[in-house]
Image (tube, rainbow, N blue to C red):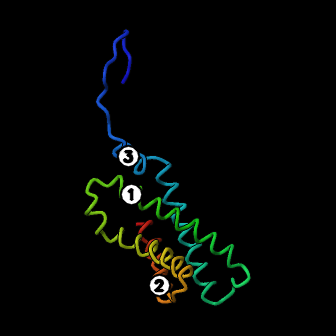
């Protein structure tokens, strides 16, 4: 609502969804999110490789914290991209969405598995999907 000559006039509102989508496409914010996503993908891949060879045994808490920050960022980005999507169901079943989910869900499954003492070693293999995520960001 804007005020003009003492009267309140309503301006045609552009939805928050459309404004956010435009910012993601046309401003430095979108570029920044893509850049951070790429950096986090590379860090996640490096962590996966280093964890596979057992180099982080003494630094498990640090590796877990880094992994948690990365997965929280990816989850936020996924939710944001879902929110700005005009056709949300189409986004959910898209290839990009599948890659995103395949990089997010295994980490949560591993965290739950560690807490529940369940062996989820097979899930670690799926985490390499971050490489596909990195390729998706630079498309």
Residue under circle 2?
123
Labels 3 and 2 touching (C-beta < 8 A): no
Q: Is residue 40 left or right of residue 88?
A: right
Q: Is residue 108 left or right of residue 12?
A: right
Labels 1 and 3 touching (C-beta < 8 A): no
Residue depth check, mark 3 versus mark 2: number of the one nearer the observer: 2
Q: Residue at x 51, y 87 (%)?
A: 118
Q: Quadrant of residue 97?
A: bottom left
**Residue 120 at x, y percent in the picture:** 49, 87
Q: Which residue is nearer to you in this view: 130 or 73?
A: 73
Q: Which quadrant is home to the C terminus?
A: bottom left
Mark 3: which secondary structure?
Answer: helix
CA gap, disc 2 and disc 1:
25 Å
CA gap, disc 1 and disc 3:
12 Å
Residue under circle 3?
22
Residue under circle 1?
81
Q: Which residue is nearer to you in this view: 27 or 3?
A: 3
């Amino acid at each position: 609502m804007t005020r003009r000559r003492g009267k309140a006039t309503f301006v045609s509102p552009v939805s928050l969804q459309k404004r956010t989508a435009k910012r993601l496409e046309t401003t430095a914010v979108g570029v920044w999110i893509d850049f951070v996503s790429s950096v986090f993908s590379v860090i996640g891949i490096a962590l996966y490789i280093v964890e596979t060879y057992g180099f982080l045994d003494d630094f498990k808490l640090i590796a877990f914290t880094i992994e948690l920050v990365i997965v929280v960022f990816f989850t936020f980005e996924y939710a944001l991209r879902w929110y700005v999507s005009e056709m949300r169901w189409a986004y959910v079943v898209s290839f990009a969405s599948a890659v995103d989910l395949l990089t997010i869900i295994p980490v949560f499954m591993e965290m739950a598995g560690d807490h529940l003492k369940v062996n989820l070693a097979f899930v670690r293999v799926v985490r390499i999907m971050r490489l596909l995520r990195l390729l998706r960001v630079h498309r």
